[in-house]
């Protein structure tokens, strides 16, 4: 069975460019999370989807960040007009349920470098 | 949201047990205690979770204090592959995992 996959694995962008990061969760998983991990830090929550509904976007650092999951499966995190401070690893995780006992399954992450 | 406190780093000799502590003094009654670990250049990986009772699985054991204000992840025999950053996380029926900075475990051969 396939786990969570993310693409691209590495992305280099020039400052000001727009980028789109893709997450393919485990089939049938209701919950999907995006995290941002700066070098040497723990992952920080960005946003949460329950099926296609974005229920929490409180962690998105600015209005340049936008996420969607239109059919309740694949999700895309888009960053507009990238800045150097956006350089980080972006992690996606999915979970089969919505309760606190459900574990999250993480993808390998996309490493974004903004020059 | 309840937060956790962990030592920044720990060392263990290979094939010896490792006890990784976590303090969560503001835990609420509905918070599950989760442990994840992250190997270099990989996404976090689930290790174990519990609510009130001690838990065992093939990877580790989780010992939860009676007042639930602290817990300990126990690796029974550390191997070199267990070298990772270990995160203790509280989660209720909510959306967010707060990872903190975790404990970096070094295993000495």
Image: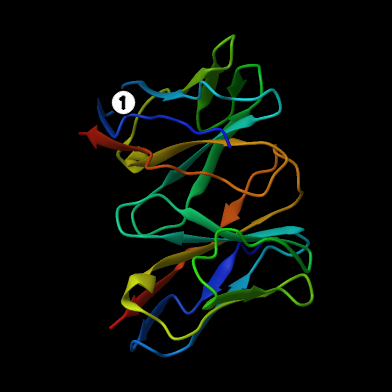
Work out whether residue B29 or residue B34 is closer to the camera in this orientation and state it: B29
Q: How far across and down, in percent of the image, does residue B101 sit? A: 37, 42
Q: In this view, does B7 lie above or below A98?
A: above
What residue appears at the point 63 percent right and 62 percent down from the top-left corner? A57
List the single residue furthest toward the front.
Answer: A63
Instruction: Say whether residue A102 is left or right of residue B22.
Output: right
Q: In which quarter of the image is the C terminus of chain A?
A: bottom left
- With B3 as the anchor, is A75 left or right in this view? right
Residue A40 lies, in percent from the top left, at 30, 53
Q: Which of B85 and A76 is in front in this view?
A: A76
Q: Where on the picture, by quarter, is residue A34?
A: bottom right
Q: Mark 1 points at which residue?
A: B15
Q: What element carries label 1?
A: loop
**Residue A53 spot, x, y in % from top left:** 78, 66
Q: Position of residue A69 (x, y in %)?
A: 71, 73
Q: Which residue is located at x 76 percent, y 77 percent?
A: A70
What residue is drawn where x is 73% and y is 40%?
Answer: B93
From this view, report whether residue B83 is shown above or below residue A75. Answer: above
Q: How is the image coloured?
A: rainbow
Q: Nearer the viewer, residue B99 or A28?
A: B99
Quadrant where the N terminus of chain A is found in the figure: bottom right
Q: Residues within 10 Å of mark 1 (few under 14, many from 20)?
A: some
Q: Is residue A72 left or right of residue B68?
A: right
Chain containing mark 1: B
Q: Which residue is drawn at 45% across and 23% down?
A: B23
């Amino acid at each position: 069975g396939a786990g969570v996959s993310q693409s691209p694995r590495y992305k280099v962008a020039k400052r000001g460019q727009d980028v789109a990061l893709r997450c393919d969760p485990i089939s049938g998983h209701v919950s999907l999370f995006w995290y941002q991990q700066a070098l040497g830090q723990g992952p920080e929550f960005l946003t949460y989807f329950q099926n296609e509904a974005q229920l929490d976007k409180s962690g998105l650092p600015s209005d340049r960040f936008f996420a969607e999951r239109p059919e309740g499966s694949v999700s895309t995190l888009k960053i507009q007009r990238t800045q150097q401070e956006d350089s980080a690893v972006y992690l996606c995780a999915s979970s089969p349920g919505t309760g606190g006992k459900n574990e999250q399954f993480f993808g390998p992450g996309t490493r974004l470098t903004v020059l | 949201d309840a937060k956790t406190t962990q030592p920044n780093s720990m060392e263990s000799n290979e094939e010896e047990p490792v006890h990784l502590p976590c303090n969560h003094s503001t835990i609420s009654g509905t918070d599950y205690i989760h442990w994840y670990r992250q190997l270099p250049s990989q996404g976090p990986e689930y290790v174990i979770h519990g609510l009130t009772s001690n838990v065992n699985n093939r990877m580790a054991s989780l010992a939860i204090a009676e007042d639930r204000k602290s817990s300990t992840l126990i690796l029974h025999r550390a191997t070199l592959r267990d070298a990772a950053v270990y995160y203790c996380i509280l989660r209720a029926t909510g959306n967010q995992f707060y990872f903190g900075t975790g404990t970096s475990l070094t295993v000495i051969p």
